[in-house]
Amino acid sequence: MNQILSFVNSTLRYFNYDFVRYALIAAVFISISASLLGVTLVLKRFSFIGDGLSHTAFGAMAIATVLKLSNCNLLVMPVTVICAVILLALNNFTKVKGDASLAIISVTSMAFGYFLMNVKSTAANVSGDVCSTLFGSTAIITLNKSDVLLCGIVCAIVVCLYLLYYHNIFAVTFDEQFARSCGINVTLYNFMIAIVTAVVIVMAMNLVGSLLITALVVFPGLSAMKVCHSFKKVIAVSAVFAVFTSIAGVLISVIFSTPVGATIVLSQAVMYIIFCIVGKIR
C-alpha cells in the first residue's frame, strides 16, 4: 500500500510542471476532435485520408523548417487544407480515385519533405528533427499556451459542427444518395469534413507525429463499434476512449520516459483488443 501511495504522490508531482499540464490538455482536445471525425471517416471508408494528409503536412513542415518560420502552422495548416480539398476534388471529378490520388500526393510530399530537410536544413541533428516530426517524440512536451488555445478552438469547432449538423452528417456518412434526395448538399459537407480533418491532422502531429496519426483517427471509432450499435453511442464511446488512452499515454510517457506518440498508440491498441474481447463476449 505504501508503495502505491508513493507512486501516486510522485505521479501527482508531475502536474506541477507546465509542460505536463499543457500536454494533457492538448491531448484531450486533439483526441476528442480526432475521435469524432474518425467515426465519420471510418464509416465512409475514407480513414486513410488521415495518413495521407499527415504525409502532406510533413512536407509542408519541412518547408517551414527550412524557411525558419517561427510558427510552422502558418504554412502547414493552409497547405494541408488545400491538399484535402484537392484530394476530394480529384476523387469526385477525375478518373484518379481515392486511394490512388492520395498515394500520389502523400508519397510525393513525404519524399520532398525528407529531401528538403536533408539538403537545405542547417540543423545539427536532422535525423532527430525528422524522427520527432514523424513520431511525435518531443513536440507534445514543448507546447505553449497559444498551442493549447489553438487546440481548444479546433476542438470546439469540431464539437459544434457535430452538434449543429448532426443529422446531416449522419445522413452523409451512411448514404450520400439518400442525403441528396433529402436536399442535403453532400458536396459541401464532404468538403467541410475534409477541411476540418486537415486542421485536426496538423494539430495531432504535435501529439503522435505524422506517421501515427491514423491510429488516433481509426482506433477510437473502431473500438466503439465493437461494443455499440448506434451512431450516437459510437460517437460518445469513441470520444471517451480517445481521451482516456491519450491521457494514459501521456502520463506513462512522462513517468517512464517513453516516446509520447508511440505510447499513446500502443495504449489505444491495447484498449482496442480489450474492446474486441468485450464485444465478442456480448
Image (cartoon, grey):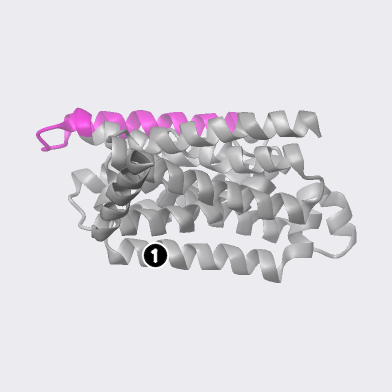
Pick the front one: 160 or 191: 160
Question: Is residue 93 shown to the viewer in this render?
Answer: no
Rendered-image quadrant of the C terminus? top right
Residue at x 72% of width, y 33% of height = 278
Q: Is residue 232 left or right of residue 22?
A: right
112 inside magenta stretch: yes
Q: Position of residue 177 (x, y in %)?
A: 86, 50
211 inside magenta stretch: no
Rendered-image quadrant of the N terminus? top left
Residue at x 79% of width, y 30% of height = 281
Pick the front one: 121 or 163: 163
The tally of labels here is: 1
| Classed neighbour count for the residue bearing mark 1: other residues with Cα under 10 Å, few (<14), some (14–19), many (≥20) | some
Residue at x 66% of width, y 38% of height = 223
Q: Position of residue 196 (x, y in %)?
A: 55, 57
Q: Is residue 116 left or right of residue 241?
A: left
Where are the magenta residues, as a range? Answer: 99-128
Q: Is residue 93 above or below residue 114?
A: below
Question: Is residue 157 shown to the viewer in this render?
Answer: yes
Q: Position of residue 35 (x, y in %)?
A: 59, 49
Q: Which residue is mark 1?
A: 150
